[in-house]
Amino acid sequence: MMLPAAGLMAAVDLTGYISGLKLVPVLLIFLIWARVLSWIDKDAEGAHLPREILNTGIIIAGLAGVALFLFLPNYWIALGVLVVVDLASVGTYLGMRQRIVGLGDLKQQFREFLQGIFKREKKAKVSAGQVVLAMKSGTVLAAPESSDDPDVLGYQTSQLLLTDPLQKNAERIEVRPSEGGASFQYVVDGVAYKADTLDAGSASAAITYLKQAAALDTEDRRKPQSGFVRATLDGKRRDLEIATAGTTAGESLRISVDPKKRHELKFHTLGLLSEQLNAVQEILGGDPGITLIAAPRAQGLTTMLYSILRLHDAFLNHIQTIERGKREDLEGITQTALSAGATAAEEFKQVEWVCSQQPDTCMVDEVVNPASALELVRFADDGRRVYVGMRAGSTFEALTNWRRLVGDDVKASKSLRLIIAGRVMRRLCTACKLGYAPDPETLRKLNMDPAKVETLFQARTQPLQDNRGHPILCEFCQELRYKGRFGVYEVFVVNDDVRQVIAMGGSVNQLKTVFRKQHGLYLQEVALRQVEAGETSVQEVLRVLRNANEAQTPPPPVTPSKAKRIPPRPPKAPTA
């Protein structure tokens, strides 16, 4: 970047020498602008934006800023104009990126950038795409240097097991013995993807290698073992929980990625609609009582329970939990673990003991014993707050199960305040999703207004292509078509009207009538709002709600005549 003449004149003092202090801001602006331009050049390609046009536009804007700096007579005014022009060009790019693919992923990029500045760690020399493993002690495991090393096969196979799943942000990786070798799959956003079958020798070598990294007993191939390893791939660090177990067919491996971060979401980020969030927070902050939290397995029940507990100050309130297989340590909360196979009698014994401690808040992630339910009702009647997790598909199913468990409708409803049922859905990749004009008749069947809904989105079925027609990888979703998940929720407020229906032995249909009077939305309706907002697809809604009570007659799949990439419009139904 050439220093403009006027800028130099402004920077010259009376003795004829250039002021070094005034040159510093100019050089700093140039270095920052060049670094940002380099980032935009790479980012635009990954976000599938017109890279050449954007580069040309930003360079022209930079030259315009230099020209203004050149001709403006006052140094400080010229410097300010230069900064404003450069910021405007960058802001224009970010605005375009926000409209097309969003800016959510930039937070993680910025966080990693800051970590790279402030954390001066010694890094092993690795190739791009190579996974570096470190033991819990911090010792980095070096790659075998020769083909004669006995760890070569284990190292190479572990690279195969870890690289692709970690690049795709997998939460779990599994290797199980099967006929003729070992099956290999990984789970991303709750969906399992099968990989190539491994031969028995390679699978065994990889399991042994990873057990060594986790400081486990490599000689014992039958007893369940678990340990931790830290993995680094392309500068991104992950904590891996290595769990192995043996059967007569062979040894199995399960790798959980960042297990301690899995349930860290805060309640307001789960995905409730703004009106749902306001109603829930008002009730949870009001009178104590019982709240039922429901979801099918692997649909976010634990995350919901933990996020609700975090709404209460654990240092001002005495909070205790009873959990079948504790998922995470909660700061300031007393957690009692029950084994997954605990009997009904063991469950009741723990519930009775925890209630005897008189905590302000109690959470039980699953209740199977009617005696436990009755004890929790008695506890809530004494002015305590109780959260009960239930494996149910809707608020009405959860309520039906609770009434059956308690065995007395009046007791079941007396302290009941709220029921929340949820599902977790995948979010369409913002960079490569396809927009299409849906058929008006299909929209009517989905209870959408054809006059208001012009575009819906779906996952693409064909590879992306560059200008020459060559297939290219979507760096946002790593060709999975979806990236990340969000929750959809059904919220049923248990007021006096609901209690009256329950006390009279009311049916589910009668309860649904009261639900509608509350302007409540069914799970499917909330999910379709997210479809209309461009967050997910009709196909994803069908996949997730297939077994829901309200989706026994699911909406028909949308088959667009023409699909193309259309920038999403601002959501009509913003979520909290």
Image: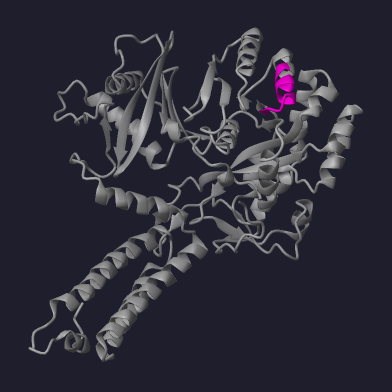
At which x and y percent is residue 107? 41, 53
| Above or below: residue 121 compared with residue 209 | below
**Residue 19 location, quadrant:** bottom left
Residue drawn 59% across and 59% down?
A: 435
Specify the quadrant of the image occupied by residue 298.
top right
Q: Residue at x 14, y 29 (%)?
A: 146
Q: Which residues are magenta?
A: 375-385
Q: Nearer the viewer, residue 293 or 284?
A: 284
Q: Is residue 197 visible?
A: yes
**115 within the magenta span:** no
Q: Assign the magenta stretch its main secondary structure.
A: helix
348 over 96 or under it: above or below? above
Image position of 329 (left or right of 521): left
- Residue found at the far right of this picture: 504
Q: Is residue 376 magenta?
A: yes
Q: Is residue 6 left or right of residue 422?
A: left
Viewer-nearest residue: 16 or 4: 16
x and y percentages locating residue 356 in the rendered image: 63, 15
Compare residues 18 and 362 and report the one nearer the observer. Answer: 362
Q: Residue at the spot x=56%, y=15% of the render?
A: 340
Asked whether the viewer can see residue 559, the reply is: no
Residue 227, position as x, y percentages in the image: 35, 21
Pick the quarter of the image with the N terminus: bottom left
Residue 295 placed where, x, y %?
A: 65, 32
- The scheme the figure's colours follow is one colour
The one of 431 and 414 positioned closer to us in this rendering = 414
- Looking at the image, residue 89 lies above or below residue 35: below
